[in-house]
Amino acid sequence: MEAVTLTRKPRSPLRLALRRLKRHKTAMAGLVVLVVLYVAALFADFIAPYSYDREMRKNSYAPPSKLHFVDADGRFHLRPFVYRVSFAFDEFQNRVYTEDRTQRYPIRFFARGDKHKLLWVFPTDRHLFGVEEPARLYLMGADSRGRDLFSRILYGGRISLSVGLVGVAVSFVLGLTVGGIAGYFGGWVDGALMRMCEMIMIIPGFYLMLALRAAFPPTLPSTSVYVMIVLIMSFIGWAGLARVVRGMVLSIASKDYVTAAKAVGGKDIIIIFRHVLPNTLSYVIVSLTLSIPGYILGESALSLLGLGIQDPQASWGNLLSDAMHVEDIHFHPWMLIPGAFIFVAVMAFNFLGDGLRDAFDPRMEVGKG
């Protein structure tokens, strides 16, 4: 009886890279955190109990709500509840909030609240959770106008997290196109494009953002400011990527399959985008992942300085503007929570970028696993 020899199908480089990525614990942890943050931002109007601009001035700087399971009479309740709060001034004219324990306000799921459009399409007034008026649920406290900080953080995540993705998308297109053309054609085309990149790279990025933003009127709507911030940051960030891609293309352009594509009459632009640039994607994906935190921090810095997204629109940067003074941090420490979200998002992107870099490293042993 003849022996049957089983041959294992060779794995593609992409499958091997994804397998190594799954074994990278910190990278997978970062990926999970980012998925949670982006899903929360996408469904912010449903998850948030209030709209980002819903004010209640009498609850200015109200502390985070206390969730109770035992009422004033000592009875246990399965559903958590809150009490209505009121304030009085102490001898230093600081607000001191106290709970009115005469009536409970249970936390209800799929509660009715502010009207919104789910995913910007479906009108509804349902929220994931909430409490009945006149009580207010402040999971992370309130800001100076009595707006729920948790709701504003969720809405702010839409700006702060998307600005990185949109920004790197623009940088991706510009960097790949300019770097690919420069490396493929060489000569005076390469020299002209690389001198342009170097001129952009020597300009201090943050000061350029300040100068360009200050050149526009401060009365611009937040949507225009958002688009402008993305374009400014993308204009700054693409040049470095283009130079690295150009160096990779110089090497790839001499490969046999590129020479064969030229020999059969392929057009240069098709060869660049079909045969040359796809071989740079392993580096580009890692580079873009590691550069997204720079966009998040840049938008946050502009908004913190009052040059970015303007109130009442929320971003993680302008939410930190209420924590600019030591006394604000001392008396209202929950105003620093948006900074914690910035830190977590930046670290998650860095962990994921490190994992992608290790996974796509060609020096890794391909045959393992």
Image (cartoon, grey):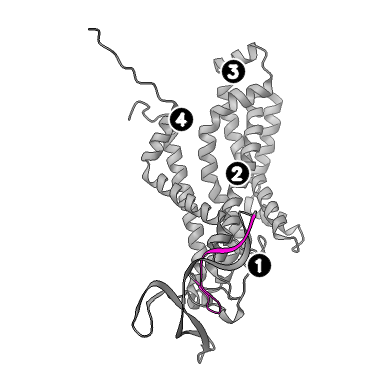
Give how far across and how far down residue 75 sits, in percent. 34, 80
Q: Earlier in the sequence, mark 2 or mark 3?
A: 2
How many angstroms separate mark 2 from mark 3 (CA)? 28 Å
Residue type at tag 1 = Pro
Q: Earlier in the sequence, mark 4 or mark 2?
A: 4
Q: Nearer the viewer, mark 2 or mark 1?
A: 1
**Image point 69% across, 37% down: which residue?**
196
Badge 4, how many Cα within 10 Å: few under 14, some, many 20+?
A: few
Question: Does dot 3 land on a helix, a strand or a loop?
Answer: helix
Q: Earlier in the sequence, mark 2 or mark 1?
A: 2
How many angstroms separate mark 3 from mark 1 (CA)? 54 Å
Q: Which residue is mark 2?
A: 168
Badge 2, how many Cα within 10 Å: few under 14, some, many 20+?
A: many
Residue type at tag 3 = Val
Span of residues in magenta = 122-138
Q: Which residue is mark 4?
A: 14
Badge 3, how many Cα within 10 Å: few under 14, some, many 20+?
A: some
Q: Which residue is mark 1?
A: 312
User: Is any atom of residue 95 visible in this view?
Assistant: no
Give how far across and how far down residue 9 sits, in percent. 38, 21
Q: Nearer the viewer, mark 4 or mark 2?
A: 4
Badge 1, how many Cα within 10 Å: few under 14, some, many 20+?
A: few
**Image point 49% across, 85% down: which residue?**
96
| Residue 355 against residue 305 in the figure, above or below | above
The residue furthest top is: 1
| Residue 369 against residue 71 in the figure, above or below | above
Q: Earlier in the sequence, mark 3 or mark 1?
A: 3
Residue type at tag 2 = Val
